[in-house]
Amino acid sequence: MSTFMAKAETIERRWFVIDAAGQPLGKTAVKAANILRGKHRPEFTPHADCGEFVIIINASKAVLTGRKLEQKYYRHHSGYIGGLKEIQYKTLMATRPEFAMELAVKGMLPHNTLGAKAFTRLHVYAGENHEQAAQKPIVLD
């Protein structure tokens, strides 16, 4: 008997909706990353792209526990001298909550071509309306 190895061409991808309202940002990101990677499937293969599509709604209503709103910063550098930019998460969640959720999910995916491909299947919305109703997504708790 041989071991089953999934292939990206044979995977039938479904769509899932995750509601982030009142949920911690990190816990929502973990759920999304596991589905994007395909770890919830019995035929999960680490070197193959087995993941599915994820829609996260109500990203603006996700919560950060503790004092993360004041103490956590998103930092990036322009590449020039003195080019360090930092934004407090309180500001980031108020202005661009979709970006904050995408950052959390992207950090939980593998940092290679598999993770980059999985990240393209993520759709994040600040409100509760999304544009993928035609795909008949499955709502997760």
Image (tube, rainbow, N blue to C red):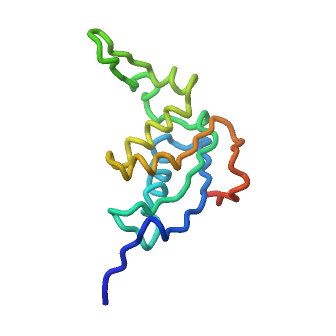
- Identity of the residue drawn at 35% across and 49% down: 113
Q: Position of residue 30 (x, y in %)?
A: 44, 50
Say which quarter of the image contains residue 78: top left
Above or below, 47 against 93 in this view is: below
Toward the top, the furthest residue is 82
The percent position of residue 33, horizontal first and vertical second, equals: 45, 51
Tell how many labels. Answer: 0
Q: Position of residue 19 (x, y in %)?
A: 62, 47
Point out the image quarter for the N terminus: bottom left
Residue drawn at x 49%, y 38% as measured from the top left: 102
Q: In the current view of this chain or complex, which residue is farthest to the bottom?
A: 1
Residue 67's x, y, as percent? 43, 28
Q: Which residue is located at x 55 percent, y 55 percent?
A: 53
Give the image quarter of residue 37: bottom left
Report whether 2 appears left or right of 40: left
Above or below: residue 22 compared with residue 15: above
Judged left or right of residue 36, residue 18 is right
Q: Nearer the viewer, residue 34 or 82?
A: 82
Residue 62 found in image quarter: top right
